Each structure stands twice: as structure tokens, then as C-alpha cells.
Image (cartoon, rainbow, N blue to C red):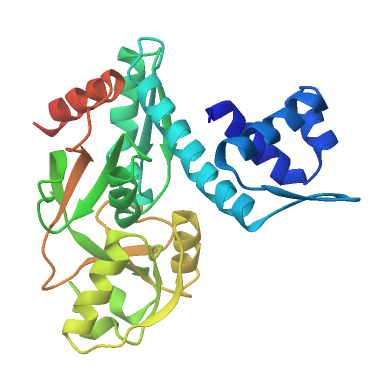
Amino acid sequence: MKLKQLEYFQVICKYNNITRAAEELHVSQPSLSSVIRELEDEFQVPLFHRLSKGLVPTKQGQILLEEAQLVLGQVKHLTERMQAFGAGSQRIRLGTPPMMATLIFPRLLQTFNARHPDIQLQMMEHGSLANRRMLLEGELDAALVSDSAAPPSTFGYCEFPPVRICFYVSERHPLAAQPYVSLEDTKKVPLALLGEDSFLADFMTRHFQEQGISPSILLHTSQLATIRRLIESDAAAAFLFDQVLETSGGIVKLPVRGLPLIRMFLMWNAGEAVTPAARKLIRLAEDFSR
């Protein structure tokens, strides 16, 4: 059994038709028929029911298809991983949460692009919780992540200065005149929280639960522009990191009593080799964090 045979078999199953599969693969129909015979001879089982309208995988054929998809997916993943180590690969897949991208990334990106114009930063916007998972699954080379504690040993990281959580509200809201707010103060205020895959949404939900408070959540969104419009129109308020939104256009920023500072990290999978391109980004981030 060869990988090429599995690739051809997968396309044949896609169409259940030799002619259409041959057109997509740009090979002859006899070549594909030969592949089916070779696989059936090797495994000593029929892989297709031959019908007048085309081919239908047998039970054994369906099992082979499922396993072939897993094998080919792994081969593709391995190929991409290994190519990333080659001298010709100059790409970094970087996970960037919306708020951290606003706080940290512009200056880091500007400096990195100036120093390494040949390296492509492929930015993927996800929350911190999703970024952690994607690092472990090999879908990202590095990611910006926020947390209240240091990452576990499964990750390598460099740490940026911490930030505080603030409560952003319209200047017309009664709470805007206070010097600070508590979670109890905000329990009846409609809230626009970040996406549910974000650290901050998870963090605030847990703190509300610990205090026995049921917040009034209007929506979850990763779009800071949407959150800003809702605050300006006094339709909602939001818990965001300090300096994420400018306090202009009728927005007031208040400290939140009882919440810890939040730590900021650039993280990577400690169990996997880091690509040369990603290593350059890590070194620059380490300079920025000093």
C-alpha cells in the first residue's frame, strides 16, 4: 500500500465515480481502476460495489476510507511541520487575542517586520483559551496569552508587564461618577463580554460565580469596535484590560476593586521544536519584556 494509492482511493470515494475522479486527479481511468484492484488484492476484500450508476464503498471500503483520511491528514501535518524547519520556510502562525493584539502587538509587529522583512507573520485571532489548545495541537507556532498565573511546564513563555482589568461605561451611566466599582455594583448592568474562548470572559464568569452574582450578559463578541459602540450608546458596559479603549467619545474607565493584575505572555509548545523563524520572534519578545 502506497500513499498515492490512498490519495487516489480517497478521491474515488469522493465522487463514487472513476471518470470524475480521473478528471480531478489528471490521470487515466485505467490507472484508477488498477489502483482499486491492487488494494483489493492486497487486503483480500472488496472495496466497492460496482453498480450501473457508479461505485459504492463496501463496509471494508468505508473503513479503509476513514483510516486513509486519518493517515493522509497526519502526513499533511507532518509535511507542513518539517517544511517549517527548512531554510525556505519563513512563516510564523501566531495566535493573537483581540485585546492583547491591541496592547502589545503593534510595536512588536513593527519592530519584527523591520528586522525580518522576509518572514511572514500569519496572525490568527483567537481567545487565550483557544490559543493554548491550538499550541498543544500544533496549529500555532506561538501565541499571545493572558492568565492570572504562570503557564504550566508544557509551555515555554516570556512574560510582558501585567495589566489591570477596568470597567468601561458610558459617561452618562450612574456608575461613571464613582471612583471605582465592585462586581456587586455591576450585576444589573448589561455587559458586552469578549468571546467565550477568551481568558477574560472565563475569568470574569468565575469571579461572578465565586461572589454568588448572576451578571446581566448582553452578548459575547471578539469585536472591540462593537463593544465600543455599545458603550458609547449606553447600551452596555464592558470589562476590558486597561488602555484597550480610549476614554474618549463619552467613555469612562473605572478601576475594579478586588481583582488581581493579569499576566501577559508569549507562549509556545515546550514539547515541540521551535522553528527558526518563531525563535526570532521569541527573542524579540524577550527583549520587549525586559
Q: Quadrant of residue 207?
A: bottom left
Q: Nearer the viewer, residue 250 or 168?
A: 168
Q: Nearer the viewer, residue 280 or 258?
A: 280
Whether 197 is drawn above or below 73: the answer is: below
Drawn side of residue 255 relative to residue 196, left or right: left
Report x, y in % for residue 107. 30, 30
Report x, y in % for residue 111. 29, 21
Drawn side of residue 52 relative to residue 186, left or right: right
Mark yes or no: residue 101 visible.
Answer: yes
State the residue at coordinates (15%, 39%).
157
Report x, y in % for residue 81. 37, 28
Q: Nearer the viewer, residue 257 or 279?
A: 279
State the residue at coordinates (33%, 14%).
116
Question: Given the current orientation, which residue lies at the most extreme right position?
Answer: 52
Q: Quadrant of residue 269?
A: top left
How many circles with numbers are drawn on the protein? 0
State the residue at coordinates (77%, 44%).
15
Report x, y in % for residue 148. 14, 59
Quadrant assignment for the C terminus: top left
Mark yes or no: residue 253 visible.
Answer: no
Whether 158 is drawn above or below 47: the answer is: above
Whether 122 is drawn above or below 207: the answer is: above
Whether 219 is drawn above or below 63: the answer is: below
Drawn side of residue 94 relative to residue 223, left or right: left
